[in-house]
Structures are given as structure tokens and as C-alpha cells.
Image: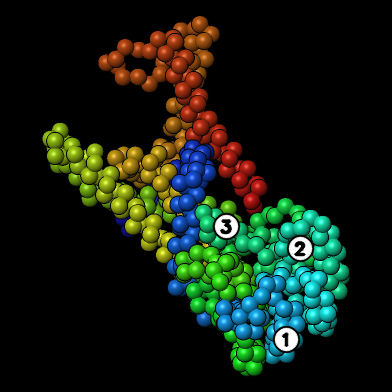
Amino acid sequence: MKRLGYFLSAFLAEGFLAFFRLSFLWGVMGWLLATSSVGQYFTSTMHAHDLQRSARWSGEKLRQAQPVVILIDDTGYDRFFGGQSPLARDRMADLLATIAGNTPAQTRVVLDIDLSPVPAQAAAQQRLEALLLEQPGRWVLPAPKPTDANAAQALQGWREGLCKKGIGFGLPYVPTEFGYPLPTHQYSGGLADAATQVTLPCADPTVEFTQVPMPLQGAMLEGGVVIPFTGDLEQLGQMLQGLAPELVFVGGGWGHLDLFGTPFGERYGVQIHAAAAAAARAGERMVSPVQEMLVIWFFCGVIGALRGLLHNAVDQTRMRDLAHLPGHAFWRDTGRPLVFFTWVFFLVIGFSELLAMVHGATGYWVSTGNVAVFTLCSVLMSWGAGRTAPQFHSGFRHAWRELVLVPIAADWRSVRAAAVAMLGAAPMHVDFPADLTAPSRWELMREGLFSLARLGAETVLPLMSLYYALKEFA
């Protein structure tokens, strides 16, 4: 019970009180790390790790909402479509008729292939659109940016005409970061976003793109159902009848264009859209900033409580007594921080695996990158890279007094002493060793400025930042 009481008090002190007084400094440091190219690349790498590990823990229930991807491969492109681009509209009509005839009437079909009018194929285009208008509510077409400014108005009119009749349009673009698909966001009005809407939208590719939280599903990228279309319509129809999918994505898989690197290997753009739609249909989502902050508090509280046990193990009394010897001094200044960082590293990896299990089982995604960044801030700022001995508290009340009330009272005494010194009165008593010369009036004023800065940085600003964060994201 004594050890449990220590662990609980240390958990509350490190996980709550430390954030209570240092959240502003941690926030500034975390922001600087996050906005730097190194920090962004680190976060991107951790996102890829999270995505890969969550796929390992995803259950069968999560996979049931996955769409089916029909990927036109090199053989299908050469044999069925004659190897020509734009694709022959009459052949595309045959393909879509096969999909419509072998899937349930409520199946939604999303195309990542531009079907805008081609002047040389007017008759075939008319046949294709007639097929689409037979069941307009089941089709989502791509709305790419017009390459010809003169044709932009005509394309917009064509899209709006089909939209009024019930056909949807989505943006066919994938947001990227460092050359890789962004695993946490998609474009608002993108193909995946459009595919999961009750009422089909009519995306406008000429407006500024905005990103919305819409994570990819790792399980879909790793082992989703992909049907390579080689040109055999009968075989495709039989496979679709057996699968009876609720959502179908159709895209190009020929050549080496529209390929993206993922933690599971290269995937075509249509597979990225399908993975985002799969996550949305399965209820996967990024946790809110407040929820993420609570998780970070919890983790820092746990490792803060464990820090005392580790510190006692590596810094025994005789180790401190012999610290004046060169070997022991090396251990104190270099070896102990190395052990501490290694320990924290394995704890972060272990916690990321736990978060991946939660993500795979429930769909809630907490960014391990953000947890690691804030933990690094704790290690560097609060714990001195493992050199600073942890404070032991008899309970939460004692921790509250030592970590919050006593520092605030000390800051306030220094500020008052500086104010009295500025008014020319006799210097007030301040905490100072008896064997040293008492501070002068100007030194008291300087101390007051420093204490005022600490009071603002470690008490006032953290409370203000915490208040506005909770107000904004609650």
C-alpha cells in the first residue's frame, strides 16, 4: 500500500501539477519542434508507424466496412481500352454497366478516372452519361482542375448539370507530406469525403482546397480487397456478385503514375481514397486536442512516477558519495542520462503499441508523435535529462504545496521586495544564504524582474493557455 500511495502521488504530481505550471513552456517548445522541418518529419514518421501497427491490431469487424477497389492494370488498359488516353467512353460504359449489374442497387461507385466530355467521342459520351443517369445517386465522379482556361466554364456547366440530376463529384487529389500521403487528413470534398456523404456533393476544383481530419485505414492499405481488371467483364461480374460490396472504387493501375509510398509499400491513388473511405465508414477518427492532452498527461504522469524508482536504482547513496571520482563523474554526467533516455525511448515505443491496440480495436487514433514530443519536453525541461533527482511527496496535498503554492509564494516575495526597493524604502527580507552578502537594491530589482517573468511563464501563461485551449476545443 505504501508503494501504491507513492506511485499515485507521484503520478498526480508529475502528470498534472507539472503541466499545471509548465504547460506554456512545454507548449512553446513543442510548437517550435512541431513547426520545424525535423519535427514535422519526425511526426510524419511516427504517423506511418502508428498506421502500420494499428493494422496489425485491427479486428475483423473493422474490415467489414472496407470498400472493394477495381484496379485497371496494364493488361486491361492495353487490351480492353486499347492503350489510349483519354479512355474510350464506350468501353468505360461497358465496364460501369457490368459493375452496376452485378452489385446491389444501393452500392455506391466512386471513379478516380476523368470522365469529362471528349470532343472526338460525343456519341460514346452520350451513352455513358445515359447509363449514369439511370441510377444517378450511386455514382461519384472526379472533378479535376481544368488544364485549359477556355474549357473551364464548359466543364463547370457539365458538372453542375449532372449534379442537379443527382450524380456526385469529388476532388481526386491526395494531400501529401514529404512525398507521402498524409495519413490523418483528406481534402474537404475529396473522393473519400464525397463517397461517405448521405447527399452527394458537387465539388468545385477551382476553389482553394482545405484539409479535414479524415485518417486512412491501415488495414485497408495493407490487405484490402483489390480486383485487378484485365479486361474480362464476365470474370469481374462473377467476383462482384460473390463480394456484394456496399462501396466500390474504380481507378487506374497502369504504368507508374499516381503511385504513393505507404508503410505497406506503393499504392495507387484510388487505393488511398478507398482507405480514407474505409476509415470513415468504420468510424475511425482522430481524437480531439483535449482528449490527446489528457492522454499525454496520463503518460507523463506514469513515467514521472516510474522515474523515482529508476533514479533510486541507478543513483544509490554510494554512487553519490563517489561522484568526485572520474569514473563515477562520467557515469553521473553521461552514463545516467544515456540510460534515462534509453528507458524513456522504450516506454514511448511500448505506449505507442498500446495506442495502436486501442486504435485497431476502437478506431480512436492518438498521435504517438505528439506524445513523444511532449515527453521529450518533459525529459529536457523538467527532469534535466535524468540528472535532476525526482521529488518525493507524501500525498497530493504535499505535492500541491511544494510544486505550486511554495514557488508562487517565493516569486511573489521577490516581486514585492523589488517593488519596495524601487520605491526607495529599506530592502525587504528575501530568502538568501546567511554566509553570503545580502543583495543590493539593484540586485533585488533584477531578482524581482526575473521572478515576475517566472511567475508569468510558469503560472499565469500556463493557466491562460490551458483555459483558452479548453474553451476552444471543448
Mark 1 surroundings within 10 Å by alpha-carbon count, few (fewer than 14), some (14 through 19), many (20 or more)? some
Residue identified by numbered label 1? 94
Residue that label 3 marks: 176
Q: Residues within 10 Å of mark 2 (few under 14, many from 20)?
A: many
Camera-side residue of 269 and 399? 269
Coordinates of residue 50 in the picture (x, y in percent): 47, 63
Q: What residue lies at 46% left-to-right and 69% top-to-bottom?
A: 265
- Horizontal placement of 93 versus 448: left or right? right
Q: Which amino acid, mark 2?
A: Ala
Q: In this picture, is 87 found above or below 381?
A: below
Q: Secondary structure at mark 3?
A: strand
Q: Earlier in the sequence, mark 1 or mark 3?
A: 1
214 lies left or right of 94: left
Q: Judging from the image, what secondary structure is the residue with disc 2 in?
A: loop
- The Cα–Cα distance between marks 2 and 3, rounded to whole angstroms, is 20 Å
Q: Quadrant of residue 132?
A: bottom right
Instruction: Write the residue at 49% across / 7% down.
Output: 425
Report which residue position mark 2 lands on: 203
Residue 149: horizontal and vertical position, in percent? Answer: 79, 55
In the image, is residue 456 above or below residue 291?
A: above
Look at the image and tell me whether residue 267 can be seen.
yes
Q: Residue at x 73, y 86 (%)?
A: 94
Residue 388 in the image: x percent, y percent?
A: 31, 39
User: Which residue type carries mark 1?
Assistant: Asp
In depth, the one of 134 and 385 nearer the eye is 134
Name the spot of residue 3 as percent of width and height, x first. Answer: 31, 55
- Give the residue type that dot 3 points to: Thr
Nearest to the eye among marks 1 and 3: give it: 1
